[in-house]
Structure formats: C-alpha cells, structure tokens
Amino acid sequence: MSEVIDNLNRVSERITAIEARLREMNPAPTGSETAFSSMVQSAGKRTPPLQNPALSPLINKAAAAYGLAPELLSAVVQAESGGNPEAVSPAGAQGLMQLMPGTAAGLGVSNPFDPEQNVMGGAQYLRMQLDRFGGDTRKALAAYNAGPAAVQRYQGVPPFAETQAYVNRVLSLAGMDE
C-alpha cells in the first residue's frame, strides 16, 4: 500500500508541476466573462445538491467504505463534475470525481467512466489526503484539487485562486463552511 501511495504522490507532484507550467505559458483570460471568474464569484453561494438520486447509494457506500461524510463526498462530486459520469476536464481528469488517468490507475480504477469505480477511487484518494494531512478537511480538499505537493510546499491551502475557491465551494456544498 505504501508503494501505491508513493506512486500516487509522485504522479500528483508531476501533475502539479505540469499544471503550474501550463498556467505560466497560458495565463487565464481576465474579465468577468471567464468561466473561472464565474466560479470564483459563485464560490460562496450554495448550489443545489446532486439531482441524480441514483448516485446517492453509491456515494453512501463509498463514504462508509472510507469513513467519509456522505455530504462531503457528494459535494466533491458536485464541484468536480456536476454529477456527470462522462465529464472530462481540459487537463484530462475523468468521471464523477475527475480522476487523472495516472491517479485512477494507481487506485486500481480501470474504467474512470464507471460511476462505482470512479467514486470508490475518488473516495479512497480523498481518505488518503485526509490521513496525510491529519484529518484537516481544508488541506485534504486542497490536495485533491492542487496536489499534495502544493499543500506541503505552502504548508496549507496554496495561494491559488482556483484551489481556494474550490475548497470553499466544496465545504459550502457539504454544509461544512465556517
């Protein structure tokens, strides 16, 4: 298991480095018309819970298997994919919990578009981040979004607007905001 965790950490660190280089090469456009600006503006607003009731048993099963609050897991699904099992991000993250292919493979997820595999893998990865960061939900969510290396480097939630908005949005959706 420690070898899998080490591999996942190396993959996550590499992904973080690549994303940082991509941001440097391709800075996001400015202005309120950008999708990112919209996300930041809506970060503090609650959105309705997932509308797909078929996901609830799966989320509950994964939450129980990994000792997570179902509301937190549901909020991650909502923030990551809006409940779309076929979602693919511009960076290549896939499925309900937007697993990167390398991360998915390291978690034993052979089909990231299979809702059960994806949610179970994402729940396992979130549990790993919670364990890694001493149960600190903010740090674990930041690691889920920006990678554990970034959280370690900044000794907390990194100063990336996208990651800060993501953490706040997930906590708000889960009803865990302060």
Image: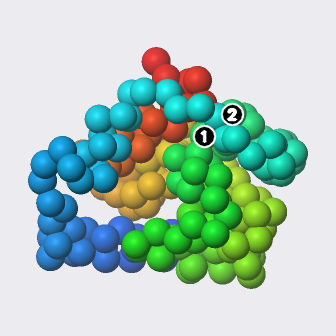
The residue shown at (52%, 71%) is: 88
Left/right placement of residue 60 relative to residue 13 reads: right
From the viewer's side, name the closer residue of 40 and 148.
40
On the image, which quarter does residue 100 sit in?
bottom right
Left/right placement of residue 54 relative to residue 38 reads: right
Q: Can residue 62 be seen in this view?
A: yes
Q: Is residue 5 above or below residue 159?
A: below
Left/right placement of residue 60 relative to residue 78 reads: right
Give the structural element (helix, strand or loop) at label 2: helix
The residue shown at (22%, 75%) is: 21
Q: Can residue 154 be seen in this view?
A: no
Direction top: furthest residue: 178
**Proximity of marks 2 and 1: CB atoms separated by less than 8 Å:** yes
Residue 55, horizontal then vertical, whole percent: 79, 49
Which residue is the site of mark 2?
A: 71
From the viewer's side, name the closer residue of 32 and 56.
32
Left/right placement of residue 104 relative to residue 150 reads: right
Residue 68, horizontal then vertical, whole percent: 73, 40
Q: In this view, does 77 lie above or below 16?
A: above
Residue type indicated by callout 2:
Glu
Give the structural element (helix, strand or loop) at label 1: helix
Residue 124, horizontal then vertical, whole percent: 71, 57
The residue shown at (66%, 80%) is: 105
Residue type indicated by callout 1:
Ala
Which residue is the site of mark 1?
A: 75
* Badge 1: residue crowd in 10 Å (few <14, some 14–19, many ≥20): many
